[in-house]
Amino acid sequence: MADEVRGVSRRRLAGAAMALGGALMVGSWPGGEAIAAGRGGTLRRGSAERAGLLPEHLDRLVEDAENFLGPSPEHPWYAGAVLLAGRGGTVALHRPIGSAVRYAAYDERSDRPVELPPERRIATAKDTVYDLASLSKLFTSLLAVQQIERGALDLGRTVASYLPEFGAAGKQAVTVRQLLTHTSGFRDWIPLYGAPAYEEKLKLIWNEAPVSPPGSTYRYSDLNLISLQLVLERITARPLDALLHDEITAPLGMHRTRYNPPASWKPKIAATEDARKPWSGIERGLVWGEVHDENAYCLGGVAGHAGVFSCAWDLAILARTLLNGGAYGRTRILAPASVDLLFKNFNTAFPGHEHGLGFELYQHWYMGAMATPHSAGHTGFTGTSIVLDPSTDTFLVLLANSVHPVRTWRSGSAPRVAAGNALARAVAVRPAHGGTSWFAGMARGTSATLMLPELSITSGRALLGCALWWDTEPGVGTVALEASADAGASWQPVPFTTVRPGEEAVEHPAGSLTGWSGRVWHAAAADLAAWRGRPVRLRWRYTTGPLYVGRGVYVDGLRVAEERRVLFDETRVDDVARIEASGWEKSPD
């Protein structure tokens, strides 16, 4: 990269950024101190303020969630849900909404539900238990990582070395790592429920050929975790449900988490679907208290990909355990290095499909603005999701019965995204300099501009400087510095540099950036020599995509100076009054 930018050295731009931007708030990697302080800590209920969250945005999280109890856009997204959000060791929000059981059946001719009489409906409660669906995959993955830690399982070894039967039909090269990262080449699923006996169901897996060479592509598949279940049961000589109880739920005190809940639990379990053909593979009627997934059901309710039932508080315990580095109170289920494997991206060859061992990473489509390169989570078909963000030490659980009364009513992940956006917004971004900074908001499909007044540059060594904080949807949301020499009739990009405290300057020759700043302020600087002798207007422009947003963009301490004079300084009352803000607002957080 060239060491000179428009006649001003990169080193000088970096120094000028710090000088013009003023003193930045600097510290260690965001979230690190909070996580370290909370290692081994347990959960407590508390206020948003105690959790270090802004209460108005937790209120917004609930309001948004309640909107999806109505048509969204045609049918309710769920009959009910339990929302849980926290930071550090504090659960600041734990709210049930809607109904755990509302419908008796689904009428496909009218596309309407058959409502239960009011006296037979069951309202959602904080401890309502939900069929987690694919969130079950996380437990199977945790059990596998435990065996890796103990030396009984190796990521690089082939599955066939543990299960010789698995090696048929071209699968002999599939590795344990490929099962955990969905890169084995398996297709999405196969109807195991069509085989009459357990042994014949296994033969369907043994005889299933990869649809792409192992390791060549990412394809999410239930067969990966079903196969991993079989590996775990072979190497431990214990069934998966016993492993779950003995290795995870009992040690952590997750007493409302298990496969095949007993009949006594049924009044506290959320109902799922009126399961009938053709939308379901099996004629079962209203599924309530039994696993919804057809393949898990035909495997006796215990499967590597689905079948676990749990409540929001238990999942919060799991989240806190992982954010603590594998410990909860005096109990440790994983070493910190093993937890790192859950948050490490093993799928760098497949951009957009970032994946740790079992956990999905950096997925805006359901994490919303909680998505960062360090965020981990998963969704479940029944309407469940969990997101952990180590960079802010926050966690979010959304448990819903969105297939009640039928799976075709649910569309997309809008409630998950809305909840993730609200919790991300609840984590304050403190201004770099004073009481407020400029915030571009979190609206989708918009362009917000922050424009300085017209300036006359007389020196060839004029610089713009400010503090800059950004978190955008990578490749879609952009923040750009632009200049106009014709009173705003046309705009052109202005190259600039950003400097993270303690690091080298990064050049942005196209005058824009995207992605994640690391939740810290950067000093930004731009050489304005090209506009010498001409009146110029400068602006920061933030553009968002139509579907998702990050936490947003903040600008603070705007200043333009030549060698002998200051042309603009945001700390001067008269100067700040001349800023034209469209879509930006002064914010204390």
Image: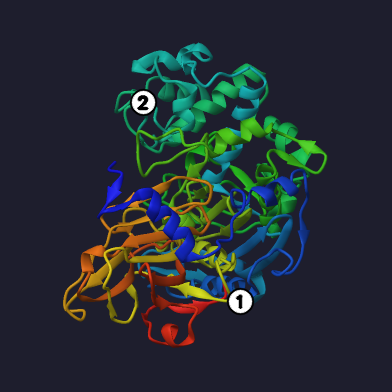
Q: Residues within 10 Å of mark 2 (few under 14, many from 20)?
A: some
In this view, the residue farthest toward the front is: 564
Residue found 38% across the figure and 60% down from its top: 525
- Left or right placement of residue 364 versus residue 419 in this view: left
Chain-order first, disc 1 or disc 2: 1
Q: From what the image shows, is residue 579 above or below residue 245?
A: below
Q: Position of residue 84 (x, y in %)?
A: 64, 61
Q: Nearest the camera: 98 or 498?
A: 498
Q: Position of residue 290 (x, y in %)?
A: 60, 47
Tag 2: amino acid: Gly
Residue 461: quarter of image: bottom left
In this view, the residue farthest toward the right is: 330
Q: Nearest the camera: 487 or 407?
A: 487
Q: Which residue is mark 1?
A: 56
Q: Which residue is mark 2?
A: 215
Name the quadrant of the C terminus. Answer: bottom right
Q: Position of residue 356 (x, y in %)?
A: 50, 37
Q: Position of residue 285 (x, y in %)?
A: 51, 54
- Left or right placement of residue 18 versus residue 52 in this view: left
Q: From what the image shows, is residue 438 above or below residue 138?
A: below
Residue found 20% across the figure and 73% down from its top: 533
Q: Secondary structure at mark 1?
A: helix
Residue found 61% across the figure and 23% down from its top: 148
Residue found 32% across the figure and 69% down from its top: 541
Q: CA distance from mark 1 to mark 2?
A: 46 Å
Check residue 257 in the rendering and tell me which mark sits there, or answer none.
Answer: none
Q: Residues within 10 Å of mark 1 (few under 14, many from 20)?
A: few
